[in-house]
């Protein structure tokens, strides 16, 4: 299996078990670069290069990251999947994809959801050789989902995302209710406990993270935030007086309030002072207008330039909004923090599989170890059901009553 992803900024990353035939195919694509220490190939992140890469690897099993969905959909005829779907901009399949995109934006779904849903809908149409989705139904959906589980061996979560994309296509866009049960072969969902570090390990990893990312990671651990919840924080969401962080439009489009650690306040105040200077500089250059969700940009046209609406953790450079083409300063890209944590874990000598979300697990577990009520922890995490929070009781050092091993006498 060849993994094609966007795990590094402005590059397409390709990893696979060593195979001289695949290497020969890789070397036919321009802009390639071999990373000797990490043992992977990378290419320029563009529709043209991705098209060349997919064409060169034709016949091989590819696992393409959904985050590359935008490239896969840019310009019919620029890549293999799009060529299979249509021969012109007015083709029925192109119109279906445009309707999907329009409905997603009408419902105010995130840009990431848009990319993911379009990616799986394209895969579904290509799998059935570009047939009209209006003429397909349960048998075709079952065949596609079974293909993902049996041939592509995707995880249960990935199969569920693909299924949700197809449900959105039929129910939300085509207005066609899927009657009856879907009897596809389902990927088995393993029962796994979350990876949790001790407090000492947690602080070692945080200490090994570069200064640019350390404040973000401390806030994620100290407040129990998800990665994107942290990156999407606005200045107005930080309440220093009440020691609270307001998380807006979290998972399930729900708002919640969580704790702001007291020992982060001085660091956060200093950080925001520097961000404020950057914002003032952007305004002076004709920029400094943040993205506003829903219709707020039309309702309050001046709000996007206000200080309170700016991101707490803005990107270093201005960039183009993929939906509107507006040049603005977005928030920090999530891949940078993920990579920094993985490197820091190695430097700290932590052999557990660590990522940014691990620090949210640690937040919950360490609060339960400190004997906080599980309902309180549930509210801080934003879990809909307490059973989701209960999983952390299984990874405590002393779950339930203290059980002493018989080997310890």
Image: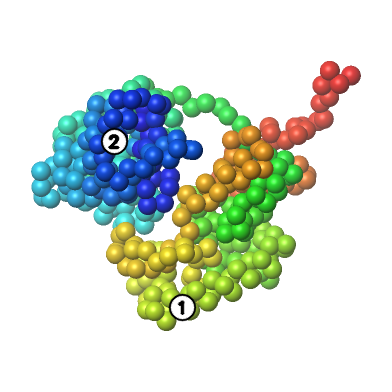
Q: Is residue 363 above or below residue 184?
A: below
The N terminus, quarter of image: top left
Residue 143 location (% of width, % of height): 27, 25
Q: Secondary structure at mark 2?
A: loop
Q: Is residue 224 left or right of residue 82?
A: right
Q: Is residue 283 above or below residue 88?
A: below
Residue 170 location (% of width, % of height): 26, 40
Instruction: Give the residue number, with chain letter if any, for mark 1.
Output: 281
Res. 216 in view: no
Q: What colour scheme has been applied to the protein in the rendered image?
A: rainbow
Q: Is residue 177 left or right of residue 354?
A: left
Residue 182 location (% of width, % of height): 33, 27
Q: Is residue 335 above or below residue 189?
A: below
Name the N-terminal-most of marks 2 and 1. 2
Q: Is residue 163 left or right of residue 213?
A: left
The C terminus, quarter of image: top right
Q: CA distance from mark 2 to mark 1?
A: 44 Å
Q: Compare residues 45 and 111 and report the one nearer the observer.
A: 45
Q: Secondary structure at mark 1?
A: helix
Q: Quadrant of residue 63?
A: top left
Q: Quadrant of residue 194?
A: top right
Q: Compare residues 159 and 276 and report the one nearer the observer.
A: 276
Instruction: Give the residue number, with chain letter if any, for mark 2.
Output: 27
Q: Compare residues 202 and 50 and report the one nearer the observer.
A: 50
Mark 1 residue crowding within 10 angstroms, few (<14) / some (14–19) / many (20+): few
Residue at image x 61%, y 62%?
Answer: 245
Residue 4 location (% of width, % of height): 36, 38
Res. 80 in view: yes
């Amino acid at each position: 299996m060849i993994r094609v992803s966007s795990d590094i900024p402005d590059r397409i990353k390709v990893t696979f078990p060593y195979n001289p035939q695949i290497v020969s195919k890789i070397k036919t694509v321009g802009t390639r670069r071999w990373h000797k220490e990490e043992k992977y190939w990378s290419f320029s992140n563009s529709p043209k290069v991705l098209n060349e890469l997919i064409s060169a690897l034709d016949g091989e099993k590819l696992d393409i990251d959904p985050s590359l969905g935008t490239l896969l959909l840019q310009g019919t005829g620029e890549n293999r999947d799009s060529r299979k779907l249509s021969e012109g901009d007015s083709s029925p399949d192109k119109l279906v994809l445009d309707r999907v995109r329009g409905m997603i934006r009408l419902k105010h779904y995130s840009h990431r959801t848009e990319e993911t849903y379009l990616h799986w809908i394209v895969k579904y149409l290509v799998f059935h050789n570009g047939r009209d989705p209006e003429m397909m139904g349960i048998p075709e959906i079952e065949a596609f989902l079974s293909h993902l589980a049996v041939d592509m061996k995707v995880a249960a979560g990935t199969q569920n995302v693909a299924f949700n994309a197809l449900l959105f296509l039929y129910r939300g866009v085509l207005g066609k209710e899927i009657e009856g049960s879907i009897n596809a072969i389902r990927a088995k969902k393993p029962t796994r406990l979350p990876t949790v570090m001790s407090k000492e390990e947690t602080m070692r990893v945080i200490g090994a993270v570069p200064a640019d990312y350390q404040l973000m990671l401390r806030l994620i651990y100290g407040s129990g935030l998800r990665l994107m919840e942290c990156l999407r924080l606005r200045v107005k969401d930080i309440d220093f007086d009440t020691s609270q962080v307001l998380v807006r439009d979290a998972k399930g489009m729900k708002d919640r309030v969580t704790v702001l650690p007291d020992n982060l306040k001085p660091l956060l105040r200093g950080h925001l002072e520097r961000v404020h200077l950057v914002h003032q500089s952007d305004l002076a250059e004709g920029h400094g207008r943040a993205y506003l969700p829903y219709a707020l940009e039309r309702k309050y046209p001046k709000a996007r330039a206000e200080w309170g609406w700016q991101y707490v953790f803005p990107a270093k450079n201005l960039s183009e909004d993929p939906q509107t083409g507006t040049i603005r300063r977005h928030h920090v890209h999530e891949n940078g923090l993920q990579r920094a944590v993985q490197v820091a874990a190695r430097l700290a000598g932590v052999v557990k599989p660590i990522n940014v979300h691990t620090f949210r697990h640690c937040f919950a577990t360490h609060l339960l170890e400190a004997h906080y009520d599980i309902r309180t922890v549930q509210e801080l995490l934003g879990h809909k059901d307490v059973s989701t929070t209960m999983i952390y009781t299984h990874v405590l050092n002393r779950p339930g009553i203290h059980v002493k091993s018989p080997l310890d006498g």
